[in-house]
Amino acid sequence: MVEPPSDPERVNFATVGSGEYDNPKYPWFSMAKAAAMTQAAVDALPNSTELAFASPSQSLQFEPIAEYDPSNFPQEGDADLFSGSTNARGSLVRDGHV
């Protein structure tokens, strides 16, 4: 699903260490599945849309699963709100607009 543009919001976060694709805590996700999801996302774009790839950290590649230490959050369970997900980012160009 591609969401329409919205007003910009600022969210700051940082991760330390290397994320792992093949994390036994998240068996539904692996490096092979990340590659397949990336290709599916690219294939789903309209023909009139160009995907402008950037550096690996900024291109449309699904990232390893982020997992956060619960002791860094004020309430137990808050880490679960941010752990166990992945995302992909990229710049789309359509009709000369990024």
Image (spheres, rainbow, N blue to C red):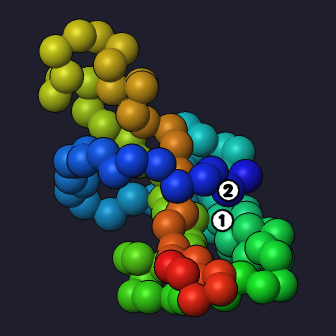
Residue 97 x/y as whole percent: 54, 81
Is 43 situated left or right of 64 in this image?
A: right
Is 4 situated left or right of 14 in this image?
A: right
Q: Is residue 36 among the parts visible in the rendering? A: no
Q: Is residue 6 among the parts visible in the rendering? A: yes
Query: Which amino acid, by three-letter code, is at mark 2?
Result: Val
Query: Which amino acid, by three-letter code, is at mark 1?
Result: Ala
Picture quadrant where residue 56 is located: bottom left
C-alpha distance separating marks 2 and 1: 17 Å
Residue lying at 36% horizontally and 14% vertically, measured from the top left: 77
Label 2: which secondary element: loop
Residue lying at 78% horizontally and 85% vertically, measured from the top left: 48
Q: Nearer the viewer, mark 2 or mark 1?
A: 2
The answer to whether 4 is drawn above or below residue 73 in the figure is below
Residue 19 x/y as whole percent: 39, 59
Mark 1 — residue? Answer: 34
Q: Residues within 10 Å of mark 2 (few under 14, many from 20)?
A: few
Residue lying at 31% horizontally and 37% vertically, measured from the top left: 68
Residue 1 x/y as whole percent: 73, 52
Viewer-proximal residue among 61 and 12 = 12
Is 25 situated left or right of 58 in this image?
A: right
Q: Residues within 10 Å of mark 1 (few under 14, many from 20)?
A: some
Is 26 situated left or right of 19 in this image?
A: right
Mark 2 — residue? Answer: 2
